[in-house]
Amino acid sequence: MQQQQGPRGAFILFEGVDRCGKSTQTSLLAKALQSKGVAVESWNFPDRKNTVTGHAINEYLAGKQDHNDRAIHLLFSANRWEKSDALLRALHSGTSLVVDRYAYSGVAYSAAKALPGMDAAWCKAPDAGLPAPDLVVYLELDNAAAAARAGFGGERYEKAEFQDRVRAAFQQLKEPSWLVVDASQSVEQIHEQILAEALQVVRRCKEGQPIQQLWG
Ligand code: 2DT
Ligand code: MG
């Protein structure tokens, strides 16, 4: 089912706390890659629209519906699994994906709740085996810089105190291979660093670097 016909696309993931600049940078990167002739799509998680789980997740984030914390964690993970076949199909067909949030957000936001029995290991388990990103770009914004940005929206996790805990959870998840970018720089400075790295990753994937699985 997944035989490869030609060069594959790259899976480039952006992670970070709310307001770190992920949306801006994902769209800039997608446009820049496109202008260099790379076939690219922009995805984001949770996918609130084209999934069975998306509606429940959206209602939860909007604060319209409460859920058991383990249950909602598993729904976020299921949301990724729902999209995983399409994700692999896109990569195998040669399309690169620039993705806003994935399993690292899943673990960081749930672990930040600091609930008994829901430690990072528990939170990671349901995502084991998902297609792994070829590059994780972590937009790092410290507490003070985040606080200085414009106000949060009204969604469930958009509170300064909780965001500080999410940031600490991301620090625990960080892997040496991540591209950690200081998100307090200018939009253009950040974009240039990411584009340079992304182009190398796209080339390596084209040359046949295999798709890994979480949490490899
Ligand atoms: P945005 O649509 O603004 O990115 O907000 N989240 C996300 C989780 O708690 N678990 C997950 O698995 C994922 C992907 C982060 C989405 C919010 O949902 C949180 C912020
Ligand atoms: Mg948000």
Image (cartoon, rainbow, N blue to C red):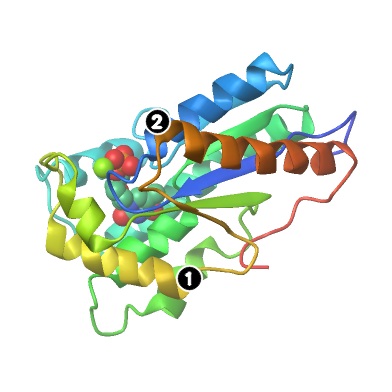
Above or below, 72 relative to 34: below
Q: Which element carries disc 1, helix, strand or loop?
A: helix
User: Residue 118: x percent and y percent?
Assistant: 32, 78
Q: Residue at x 29, y 64 (%)?
A: 166
Q: Nearer the viewer, residue 9 or 126?
A: 9
Residue 47: mark = none
Q: Nearer the viewer, residue 74 or 14?
A: 14
User: Residue 67: x percent and y percent?
Assistant: 18, 57
Residue identified by numbered label 2? 24
Q: Quadrant of residue 199?
A: top right
Count all numbered tags in the image, as a single digit: 2
Above or below, 191 relative to 70: above
Amino acid at the residue labelled 2: Thr
**For mark 2, does the 10 Å Cα neighbourhood hold few (<14), some (14 to 19), or many (20 or more) residues?**
few
Q: Residue at x 62, y 62 (%)?
A: 214
Residue identified by numbered label 1? 173
Instruction: Identify the image quadrant of the C terminus.
Output: bottom right
Above or below, 198 relative to 36: below
Above or below, 76 relative to 197: below
